[in-house]
Image (tube, rainbow, N blue to C red):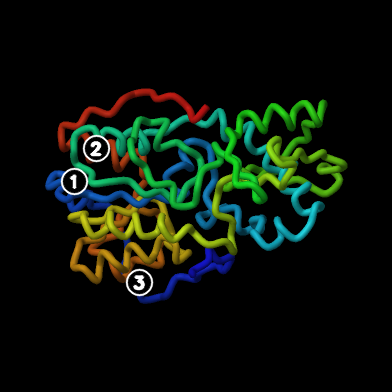
Amino acid sequence: MRMRPTLSWTPAEDLPPGTTDLQPVTEALGTGGVLVLSGAGLSTESGIPDYRGEGGSLSRHTPMTYQDFTAGAQARRRYWARSHLGWRTFRHALPNAGHRAVAAFGRHGLLSGVITQNVDGLHQAAGSEEVVDLHGSLERVVCLSCGAFSPRRELAQRLEEANAGFGPVAAAINPDGDADLTDEQVGDFRVVSCEVCDGVLKPDVVFFGEAVPPQRVEHCRELVREAASLLVLGSSLTVMSGLRFVRQAAQAGKPVLIVNRDPTRGDHHAVTRIAVPLGAALTTVAARLGVVVDDEAAGPG
C-alpha cells in the first residue's frame, strides 16, 4: 500500500521545456472526455499557497505526518491549534478563475471527471460535481476510535468555545490548512474529543505518511481508463498518489497535458507542459471554445 511521502523532488536537467501554447489543451477539451487532475497550484490564486512553487511552504514548513499525529497528545495539540487558526482562512477562500473554468467545462460536457489532490473544497464551491477528493477534505472530521464523521464547522465552534481569546498571528498559512505557529503561540491550546466516544479526532484528510484508501485509488484508476485524455492543473506530481494516474494514462496511450508553471515529475509522460498562470490559461481556453465561465462562485463555507 503506497503512502503519501514527505520526500521532495528535484527536477532533472533533461526535462522538456514548458511552452505557452494553449492549443493542445483547447483541442483536447474540444474533443471532450478530459479527466482533470488538479493540485495546489490551482488554488494559489485563491490565496492558498502551494507546497513546491516559488516561495512554497515546504521551504519553511514540514507537514504533520500521520505517525506524529497519532504518537502523542502534544503533537495533536500543535496540529489542532495551527489547523484551527488556518481554518479561519480556508473557510473564507473563494474559487478563482481556474476553478470556475473547470466547473464550466464540466457543465458543457467536456470533462469525464475531476480528481483533486487539494483538500480545500474549492472545486465543489465553484460548481464542479462528482469531484474525487484524492487526499480527503478539510470540511469533514473523523474519529480514529469509532469512525464517526462530523462537519468541520461544528468542531471549529467547539474549539472556539474551549479556547476563548485564542488568536495568535500566524507567520503563514499552508496548503494543508496548517498555520505556522511557534510552540509559545500554541501554548496550552485545548483539544476536544469525539462527542460519540471521546476518541481522538482527525481531519478527514490523508496526512503525509498515510495511505490513500484503496477503493478511492481504484475509483480514480477507473476514471483514467474511461477518459480520452488527462489534463493536469497546478501539480508538481511529486508524490506518487497523483503521479501514478499520469503514468497509467501515458501507458494506455492517452494524451497527458500539464499546465504548471514549474517542471513536474510527470513531464516525461506528457505531450506538453504549458507554463502559464492557470486562471488566465483556462479562461482563455474557455473563450476559444465558447464556454461561459461564471464571474463569481460561493466559498466552501
Left or right: 21 with respect to 55?
left
**Residue highlighted by disc 1:** 29
Q: Quadrant of residue 286?
A: top left
Identify the amino acid type marked 2: Phe
Q: Quadrant of residue 216?
A: bottom left
| Residue denoted by label 3 | 15
Relative height, residue 147 to residue 291 (above, below)? below
Q: Amino acid at mark 3?
A: Leu
Give the residue drawn at x 54%, y 45%.
Answer: 49
Q: Earlier in the sequence, mark 2 or mark 3?
A: 3
Percent coordinates x, y for residue 117 in the rendering: 45, 51
Q: Is residue 270 above or below residue 12?
A: above
Q: Looking at the image, do the residues carrying marks 1 and 2 touch, with CB atoms under 8 Å apart? A: yes
As measured in the structure, the alpha-carbon distance from the residue carrying label 1 to the one carrying label 3 is: 25 Å
According to the picture, the residue beneath numbered tag 2 turns out to be 105
Label 1 residue SS:
helix
